[in-house]
Image (cartoon, rainbow, N blue to C red):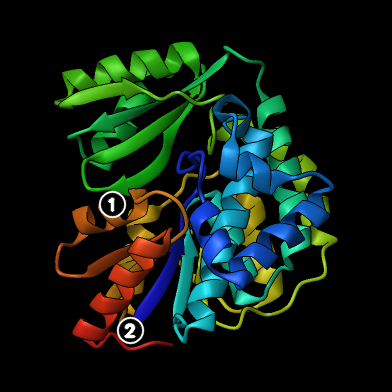
Amino acid sequence: MIAFVFPGQGSQRVGMGKALSEAFPVCRRTFEEADEALGEPISRLCFDGPEEQLALTRNTQPAVLAASVAVDRLLRARGHAPAFLAGHSLGEYTAHVAAGTLGLADALRTVRRRGTYMQEAVPVGEGAMAAVLGLSAELVSQACVEAADGDVVSAANLNAPGQVAIAGHAAAVERAGKRAKELGARRVMPLPVSAPFHCALMKAAEDRLAPELRSLVVADPAAPVVANVDAEPKRTGRESIEALIRQVSAPVRWEAVVRRLMADGVTTFIEVGPGGVLSGLIRKIDRAVGAICVHDPASLEAAEAKLLDTGAVVG
């Protein structure tokens, strides 16, 4: 059984989607639709940069979403359909576009505002994130509690065994990183992000985004979307929206999402969109499952050959 999984912010790269757009009309039409929805050429930013503009949160989020939807539509046009979907942070919005919960235009405009609200929730320099490697999630949480000292710091991305990102006030993140090393972390790496995502400091962004999300026209997803916030499959439009709202300030429980999909029978994960971050995390969670990336013509060809070879069951 197949699940489509969609990457989040950090997977962007200049050139994403360009070769697919040149080779496949369905991809080209998707980028044209995105340009029209946003009233500006997001496709040009995806294809040609400049990188510093693509890296701005308000641009990154709709750009990655558009590039991922283009791949999703191509895969479906070629007969591949998932039994389940999921996405990492921003990628959960893409999953809901792919599932039919949200329209592409609404999703693009919403994630642009989401990026703006998240950036504005914390003044630049006051927040930070760091990756903690080689330490259990329980001990990372212990480090955060012991280091907080009245500030906010908590686990933000529970990505895979021994790979947890923390977020909060910059000084508290630094203290928690030092404490994590004392508890046995192999390495603590500051992350080059513009805001401390998925922690309590994002509550202001969540409050701004909530009424906008609730005002959207939504449908029940055509296939269940397993949510970041609780690793539970969402089967109605209403519960999908509420999960997206809670996601802004709650941790991304990616390992739990993958394990839930496996428990529901998924044996092959297709990462739909730029990069290959999620495929790497999935292999780290369980090497017995298949994880395939599709982001350009060569990876499409390789993925289809692998699907044919393994006989993976589509939705």
Tell me if residue 277 can be seen.
Answer: yes
Quick one: quadrant of the N terminus?
bottom left
Left or right of 199? Residue 304 is left
User: For the residue labelled by badge 1, is the local secondary structure a helix, a strand or a loop?
Assistant: helix
Can you identify the residue that label 2 sits on?
1
Residue type at mark 1? Leu
User: For the residue labelled by badge 2, is the local secondary structure a helix, a strand or a loop?
Assistant: loop
Residue 300 % position (x, y) = 38, 68
Mark with earlier residue (2, 1)? 2
Which residue is at a point 18% across and 62% down the rendered structure image? 286
Q: Give the Cα distance between marks 2 and 1.
A: 19 Å
Which residue is at a point 31% across and 22% down the rendered structure image? 189
Residue 59 % position (x, y) = 66, 38
Residue 46 % position (x, y) = 59, 44
Q: Is residue 202 above or below residue 69?
A: above
Which residue is at a point 21% across and 70% down the rendered structure image? 289
Q: Mark 2 Cα within 10 Å, few/some/many (few <14, many 20+)?
A: some
Tell me if residue 249 can be seen.
Answer: no
Residue type at mark 2? Met
Can you identify the residue that label 1 sits on?
281
Q: Quadrant of residue 94?
A: bottom right
52 or 265: which is nearer to us? 52
Left or right of 188? Residue 198 is right
Quick one: quadrant of the C terminus?
bottom left
